[in-house]
Amino acid sequence: LFKVGQIYNERDVRESERNIRSLRQESFALIQPLEGSHPDRVKMLVVVKDIWSLRLNSDYRIQDGLEYLLLQPSEENLAGIHRRLSGLFIYEPDTITAGARFVDPRLNGSRLAWIADANVVVNHATGDVEGSNGFVSYGLPLWSTRREWACNVTAQWDKAIDRTFVGRSQAFLDVLETPDDTSDDIPFIVDSEIIAGRSTVTRSFGYRHKSDVTVGLLASRSVSRPPDLSGFDPEAAAAYVRDIVPPSQVNNGAQITYHYYQNRFASLVDVETMSLQESFLLGPELYLRWGAFPRFLASTRNLLQFRVTAAYTQRLGDGVVRPFASYGIDNHVESDDIRI
């Protein structure tokens, strides 16, 4: 946040230090002013320490055989310029998911950031491709507390066949409404499809006391379909659709978010990560969010949302304490007299 020829500003130096420290690829950051070649000049010493950038994240679950396996190899500092490239492999009793993610926080040396993520889902019993998921995000973040504007556009999709298992075996439904001597054996399978998009613009006010106002336009469509139920008892099929299959819905509308906080930070080590420097925002914090998703924008129903979250962070020795409270309301309005 400072360049050659500018007047030395301690706040910009410390914020630059925090920005470097927040990077996943850095475990340490220190910026120190030194005596310059003339009385009106200052030299800047910048010390950083990289983390090990090639890593393998994994998770698994074994019970009467392998139920779940996740492997995620990642290169956290591709080409030494903080680009991230990671792969994904997930084994489940019915499917194998494979894909990749690429993150570029400084597109062509600018402040623009973008993320691309895509995965394909294959049924390992039949070899058929039965779904995919991913997202793309592009925008300009608030990279400085002096920055006034930020924006972001995100699009995502998720198409899958969701199956429920007991251990490694497919789970089935036996509907209570049907006769006791009848086993319906409807498999817990739901064909789901989600498409969503979001576009936001943020205006940031103040310096010591910050107020960020974000206006966003959102659109989402989720569809859930049951398996072929033609061979089952009609009463059992109706109960399955009613109790198991999530209702399909469309939500199109707008949100406004207000975020208040103070420009105060504490630099600590080894709090939420292992032996890494971390910066924590101190003092009070408040989030207010309003949302409206009306039927006249092709939403399934008139929906009003409100969320409020309040928190306070205080340094306590070599750690922090952070009490917080949150409350939200989703209100379905029957009348069409609704305005955003």
Image: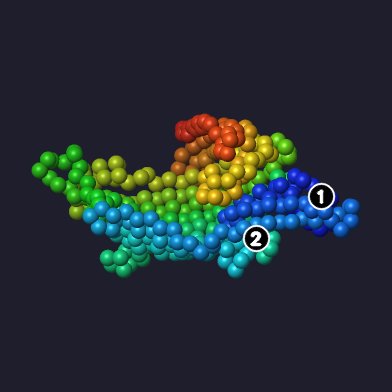
340 left or right of 7 in image: left
- Residue drawn at x 24%, y 50% is 166
Q: How many marks?
A: 2
Q: Type of residue at label 2?
A: Arg
Residue closest to the eye, 97 or 152: 97
176 left or right of 244 in image: left
The vertical placement of 240 against 61, above or below, is above
The vertical placement of 91 against 284, above or below, is below
Q: Tag 2's secondary structure?
A: loop
> Looking at the figure, which quarter contains the C terminus?
top right
Residue 283: x and y in percent read 63, 33
What residue occupies the far front of the structure in this picture?
35
The vertical placement of 255 against 4, above or below, is above
Label 1 crowd (10 A; few <14 / some 14-19 / many >=20): some
* Dot label at residue 76: none
Residue with the mark numbered 2: 106
Residue closest to the eye, 233 or 172: 172
Residue 84: x and y in percent read 55, 62
**Mark 2 or mark 1, which has the lower sequence index?**
1
Residue 326: x and y in percent read 51, 32
- Residue drawn at x 44%, y 58% is 57
| Residue 197 can be seen, yes or no | yes
Q: Type of residue at label 1?
A: Tyr
Residue 99: x and y in percent read 44, 64
Residue with the mark numbered 1: 8
Q: Tag 1's secondary structure?
A: loop
Numbered disc in front, either 2 or 1: 1
Label 2 – label 1 distance at C-alpha: 25 Å
- Residue drawn at x 59%, y 49% is 277
Residue closest to the eye, 204 or 28: 28
